[in-house]
Structures are given as structure tokens and as C-alpha cells.
């Protein structure tokens, strides 16, 4: 048997994020009848308030699924086999989403770019401008690449699509951004926004979301990919009556109710500026250690996570293991092409200064223990930043 480790585990991966006690308590309530009047009220109230989170007046679908389910829902509701989808490749999650499309029989084109800089809107515009026959039916990308800590400019990509006068559907994954940084589904004319519960929304994994536009809803009329569980129209007609076509994840919805209450109590603007400030402090520590930030584009620094490159010859996963064993803290691993080269510090969801300070202390002690070349005292740069800002 493992020995008891005193104190709490520091879950500093970029999602799932820390589960606040208030949400844990809400989830632990007794389950209610998902066809009864209390549940109907809950559904209506959730769907209305979710609109504020996604900044949309259009429908939002909540699935009992991981975010990957919502990826699939976005595709099967709007597209037909063999149709061409342009994935802006900005990291591991963009690649995984494009694999889902490939598995569904869509024709996937990857617009390759530099993972350390993010998607270049002019490259999107150039590619769409070439597509005179309108073969590309959808453009998909990830807003905040959780594998790298690079944020893509959704408004600029929207502008690129418009500049090319292209009619493709616009699909955006906001799994690690929504609820932590500004995101405007309607204003940026996104057709399908995909999200999950376990990051900025502070819930455990288990809910997937799609926010949709009227153009996306219209596309369901012609889309031929097989769909049943993911069918938006079935969910929407039940949702009108406060119901779902299946047994919903009732207790996670109790948690969502509490999460929304917490986000609105703090105020979305305050939530966003808290994330930005804590992220700046984390980067101050990384610079203080004289380590390298993975993101090379200052305008694209992520408010929810920081990707840190290891010095050559040092394995990020061995470092992460030491931090876990010695300090009971989980840091994010490098994914895909950056496996072993990078670790990620998650600073999203229910987090405050002292939690971040504890996290960065654990990183600094881990650097010492693993003999990783660094300048000691980076943590004080973060603390100074927090005192001054
Ligand atoms: N998209 C992004 C940006 C993610 O960070 C993740 C998971 O971390 C996913 C999609 C997949 O989410 P899930 O594991 O809930 O299916």
C-alpha cells in the first residue's frame, strides 16, 4: 500500500483543473428525476447562462461526453462523407481533431504552421482564396492550444475567411479557453464552438459542449454523415422542454450550475484578468529561471497554461516524475512532437496567488533536484510580479 501523502495534491496540469469544494458538494447532491419539474427548470437556467459564457444567443448543446465527443458532434452534424475540411495545425489537439475527421471519412487538409507561433491568418486567407470552387466546407482550429500554450486569434482568422470571401463553416475548439479568457461566439461569427467541462469551467471531466450558429444548424439539413447520439436537432427539440433525449449527467449539471454561479459571482472580466495576471507571474518565473518559453509570440501567450522547454539533454518527463514523487504535484507532459522536450504548468480554473506560488516553488525545487541548468530564484520574480500588479 502506498503511504499516505499529507496535504493536498497539486493538480497543475492544464486541465482537468482543481475541483472547487463548492462544485464537489453540488455534484454530491442526490440525483433527481431528469423528467421532473426541478430538472426542467435547471436545464432552462443552465442553457440561458451558458449563452453568456460563450457570448451567444444561439443554441448550446450539452452532452454527457468528453470534449472529443463534441469534436465529433461538430463534424457529423454539418458535413458529409468525402467533404474537405481545412485544419489549421497549431499543436497536438488540432492534430487529434483532424484525426477524428479523417476517421469519419472526411477529406482532411492540414494547413501546417509553426507550433511556437500559432496559426497565421494570412496563410488561411491565401489557402481559402485559392479554393475558387469552394471545395473546403469547413475551417477548424483550436483557440488555445493546450499542448503548447499558444493562443490563436479567432477574430483575425474570421477576418481571413471573410477577406477570401469564402463560405466555409468556421469551427473553433475552446476546450482550454472558454471561461478563462474572452471568447465571442456570435461576434466572431463562429459556426461551431466546441468545449469541455474540465478546464475553465472547473468541473470534473464528463461534459462536452457545442455552441452553434444558424448557418451550422441549417447545414444539418444537408449533412449526410451518420449521427444519432450526437444529433443536434434531437437534443434541441428536447431542450425546448427542458429535457434531453437520453439520461443526462444530472450530477455534473448540478456542478455546472454551481460553476456558473461562481463565475458570475466573481465576474467574467475579473476571472479573465485573474488568469492573465497569474499567467504573467508564471512566465516571470520561467524567465527568472532562464528557461525557455515554448511560445515565441508574445501576443499569443496563453492565460491558462505555460509550456516550458527543457534544456537540451534533459527529459521533461523524468523531471515531472520527480516533482510528482517528491512534492505530490502533477505537471502537464509534452504531447506529440514535443514529448519529453516540454512540460506544461496549468494555471487555470479555481486558482489564486498562493496556489500558483506553491506550484512554482515545486517546479523550482524540482529543477534543483534534477540538476537541470537554471538560474535559482525564478520564483521570486513571480512573487514580485504578483506584489506589483
Ligand atoms: N481540445 C483541447 C484544446 C484539449 O485541451 C483537450 C483535452 O485536453 C481536448 C480537446 C480533448 O478533450 P477530452 O479529453 O475531454 O476529450
Image (cartoon, helix red, strand yellow):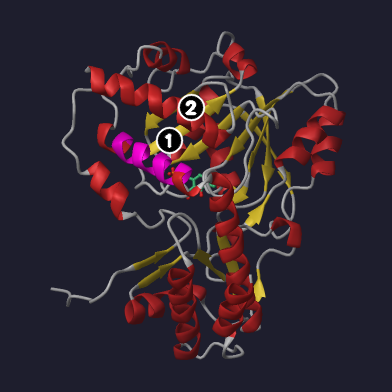
Q: Nearer the viewer, residue 235 or 134?
A: 235
**Mark in front: 1 vs 2:** 1
Q: How busy is the neighbourhood of tag 1: few (under 14 within 10 Å), some, or many (20 plus)? A: many
Secondary element type, mark 2: helix
Above or below 328: residue 71? above
Task: Report which residue position mark 1 lands on.
Answer: 208
Q: Can you say which quadrant of the picture contains the C terminus?
A: bottom right
Q: Position of residue 125 (x, y in %)?
A: 83, 36
Answer with the quarter of the image where residue 20 lies.
Answer: bottom left
Q: Nearer the viewer, residue 102 or 334?
A: 334
Q: Can you say which quadrant of the picture contains the N terminus?
A: bottom left
Residue 380 badge: none
Q: Residue furthest left?
A: 1
Q: Position of residue 376 (x, y in %)?
A: 57, 91
Q: What span is colored magenta in the figure?
A: 253-264
Question: Residue 372 lies in magenta, yes or no?
Answer: no
Q: Residue at x 72, y 52 (%)?
A: 118
Q: Residue at x 44, y 26 (%)?
A: 47
Q: Residue at x 80, y 24 (%)?
A: 166
Q: Position of residue 246 (x, y in %)?
A: 29, 20
Q: Are marks 1 and 2 in contact (CB under 8 Å)?
A: yes
Secondary element type, mark 1: strand
Q: Is mark 1 within 8 Å of ligand 1?
A: yes
Answer with the quarter of the image where residue 135 lies.
Answer: top right
Task: Report which residue position mark 2 lands on.
Answer: 73
Amino acid at each position: 500500500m502506498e503511504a499516505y501523502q499529507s496535504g493536498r495534491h497539486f493538480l497543475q496540469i492544464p486541465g482537468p483543473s482543481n475541483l472547487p469544494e463548492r462544485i464537489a458538494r453540488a455534484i454530491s447532491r442526490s440525483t433527481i428525476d431528469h423528467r421532473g419539474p426541478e430538472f426542467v427548470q435547471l436545464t432552462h437556467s443552465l442553457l440561458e447562462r451558458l449563452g453568456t459564457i460563450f457570448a451567444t444567443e444561439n443554441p448550446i448543446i450539452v452532452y454527457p461526453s468528453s470534449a472529443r465527443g463534441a469534436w465529433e458532434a461538430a463534424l457529423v452534424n454539418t458535413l458529409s462523407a468525402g467533404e474537405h475540411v481545412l485544419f489549421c495545425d497549431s499543436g497536438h489537439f488540432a492534430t487529434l481533431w483532424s484525426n477524428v475527421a479523417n476517421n469519419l471519412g472526411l477529406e482532411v487538409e492540414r494547413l501546417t504552421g509553426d507550433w511556437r507561433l500559432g496559426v497565421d491568418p494570412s496563410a488561411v486567407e491565401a489557402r481559402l482564396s485559392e479554393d475558387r470552387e469552394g471545395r473546403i466546407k469547413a475551417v477548424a482550429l483550436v483557440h488555445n492550444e493546450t499542448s503548447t500554450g499558444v493562443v490563436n486569434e479567432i477574430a483575425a482568422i474570421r477576418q481571413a475567411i471573410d477577406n477570401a470571401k469564402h463560405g466555409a463553416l468556421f469551427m473553433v475548439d475552446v476546450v482550454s479557453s472558454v471561461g478563462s479568457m474572452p471568447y465571442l461566439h456570435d461576434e466572431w461569427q463562429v459556426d461551431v464552438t466546441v468545449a469541455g467541462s474540465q478546464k475553465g469551467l472547473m468541473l470534473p471531466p464528463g461534459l462536452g459542449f457545442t455552441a452553434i450558429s444558424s448557418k451550422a444548424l441549417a447545414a444539418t439539413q444537408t449533412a449526410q454523415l451518420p449521427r444519432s447520439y450526437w444529433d443536434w436537432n434531437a437534443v434541441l427539440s428536447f431542450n425546448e422542454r427542458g429535457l434531453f433525449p437520453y439520461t443526462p449527467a444530472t450530477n455534473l449539471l448540478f456542478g455546472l450550475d454551481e460553476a456558473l454561479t461562481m463565475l458570475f459571482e466573481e465576474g467574467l472580466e475579473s476571472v479573465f484578468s485573474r488568469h492573465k495576471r497569474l499567467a504573467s507571474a508564471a512566465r516571470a518565473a520561467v524567465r527568472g529561471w532562464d528557461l525557455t518559453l515554448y511560445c515565441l509570440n508574445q501576443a499569443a501567450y496563453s492565460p491558462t497554461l505555460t509550456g516550458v522547454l527543457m534544456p537540451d539533454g534533459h527529459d521533461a518527463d523524468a523531471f515531472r516524475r520527480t516533482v510528482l514523487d517528491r512534492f505530490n504535484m502533477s505537471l502537464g507532459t509534452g504531447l506529440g512532437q514535443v514529448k519529453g522536450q516540454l512540460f506544461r504548468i496549468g494555471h487555470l480554473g479555481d486558482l489564486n496567488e498562493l496556489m500558483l506560488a506553491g506550484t512554482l516553488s515545486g517546479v523550482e525545487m524540482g529543477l534543483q533536484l534534477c540538476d537541470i541548468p537554471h538560474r535559482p530564484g525564478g520564483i521570486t520574480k513571480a512573487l514580485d510580479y504578483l506584489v506589483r500588479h
